[in-house]
C-alpha cells in the first residue's frame, strides 16, 4: 500500500517535469520566432560614428618641447535604421600624439532621426602640452617628413528602439590615426569609423 502510493507520487513528478519542459521548449521557440520576426521587420543596424574630414589649422612646436594645436574635426553620427531613431550619449574621444593626450573631445547626448545622420564639428584648441623625449623625436621626424600623425580614440554609447518595447544599447568604439600634411594641414585620407567590419 505504502509502496504503491510512493510510486504514484514518482510518476506524478515525472509528468510534472515533462509538462514544465514542454512549456519551456514552446516558450523558447516563441521567443525565437518573435526575435526573428522583429529582426526581419526592422533590420536593426548598429549606429556608428565616423570622421570624414579633418584639418590641422595650427601646430605650435618649439625646441622647449611643448605642443599646441588647433584642429577642426568633423565627426558624423550615422543612423542607418529605417524604422528607429538612435540616441548617442557619453561621447568622449581623446586626441593624442605619440601616446601623449593633446585634447579631449566630448558631446552631450543627442538623437539622430531614422535613416539619417548628424554632423558634429569640433574646433579643438589644445596645449601647450609638454612632450617627452620620445615624442619630441617623433615630432621632429614628422615635421621633417611633412606628415604629422595624431591618434583619435574613444567611444560613444548608442541606444535605439526596435519595435515597441525592445531597446538595444551598445558601445561603439573608434580608434584610428589621422595624418596631416604639414605645413598645409590637409588630412591624408581620413579613414576613421567605429562601424564594425
Ligand atoms: C533612407 O535615405 C536614403 C538617402 O538618404 C533614401 O534614398 C532612402 O529612400 C531612405 N529610406 C527610407 C526607408 O526612408
Ligand atoms: C598639402 O600638401 C600635400 C603634400 O605637399 C599635397 O599633396 C596636398 O595636395 C596639399 N593640399 C592642399 C589643399 O594644397
Ligand atoms: C581605411 O582603413 C581600412 C582598414 O584599415 C582599409 O582597408 C581601407 O582601405 C582604408 N581606406 C582608405 C580610403 O584609406
Image (tube, rainbow, N blue to C red):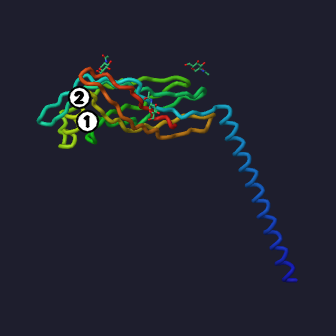
- 178 above or below 24? above
The answer to which of 113 and 151 lies nearer the viewer is: 151
The quarter of the picture where residue 192 lies is top left
Q: Is the residue under label 2 in contact with that under label 1 (CB below 8 Å)?
A: yes
- 123 above or below 105? above
Left or right of 15? Residue 86 is left
Left or right of 64? Residue 116 is right
The quarter of the picture where residue 174 lies is top left
Residue 6 rendering spot, x and y as whole percentages: 82, 78
* Mark-to-mark CA distance, 1 and 2: 8 Å
The quarter of the picture where residue 12 lies is bottom right
Q: Quadrant of ligand 1?
A: top right
Q: Which residue is mark 2?
A: 69
Q: Secondary structure at mark 2?
A: strand
Residue 154: give its label: none
Rendered residue at 56%/38% (across/down): 167
N-terminal of the pair, mark 1 or mark 2, is: 2
Residue 155 rendering spot, x and y as whole percentages: 41, 38
Q: Which residue is mark 1?
A: 102
Amino acid at each position: 500500500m505504502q509502496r504503491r502510493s510512493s510510486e504514484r507520487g514518482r510518476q506524478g513528478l515525472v509528468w510534472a517535469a515533462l509538462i514544465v519542459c514542454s512549456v519551456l521548449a514552446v516558450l523558447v521557440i516563441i521567443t525565437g520566432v518573435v526575435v526573428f520576426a522583429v529582426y526581419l521587420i526592422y533590420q536593426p543596424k548598429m549606429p556608428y560614428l565616423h570622421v570624414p574630414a579633418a584639418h590641422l589649422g595650427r601646430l605650435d612646436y618649439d625646441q622647449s618641447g611643448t605642443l599646441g594645436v588647433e584642429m577642426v574635426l568633423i565627426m558624423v553620427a550615422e543612423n542607418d535604421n529605417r524604422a528607429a531613431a538612435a540616441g548617442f550619449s557619453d561621447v568622449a574621444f581623446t586626441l593624442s600624439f605619440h601616446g601623449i593626450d593633446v585634447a579631449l573631445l566630448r558631446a552631450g547626448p543627442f538623437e539622430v532621426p531614422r535613416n539619417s545622420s548628424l554632423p558634429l564639428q569640433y574646433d579643438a584648441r589644445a596645449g601647450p602640452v609638454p612632450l617627452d623625449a620620445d615624442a619630441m623625436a617623433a615630432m621632429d621626424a614628422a615635421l621633417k617628413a611633412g606628415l604629422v600623425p595624431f591618434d583619435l580614440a574613444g567611444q560613444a554609447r548608442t541606444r535605439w528602439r526596435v519595435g515597441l518595447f525592445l531597446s538595444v544599447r551598445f558601445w561603439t568604439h573608434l580608434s584610428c590615426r589621422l595624418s596631416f600634411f604639414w605645413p598645409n594641414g590637409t588630412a591624408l585620407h581620413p579613414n576613421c569609423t567605429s562601424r564594425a567590419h
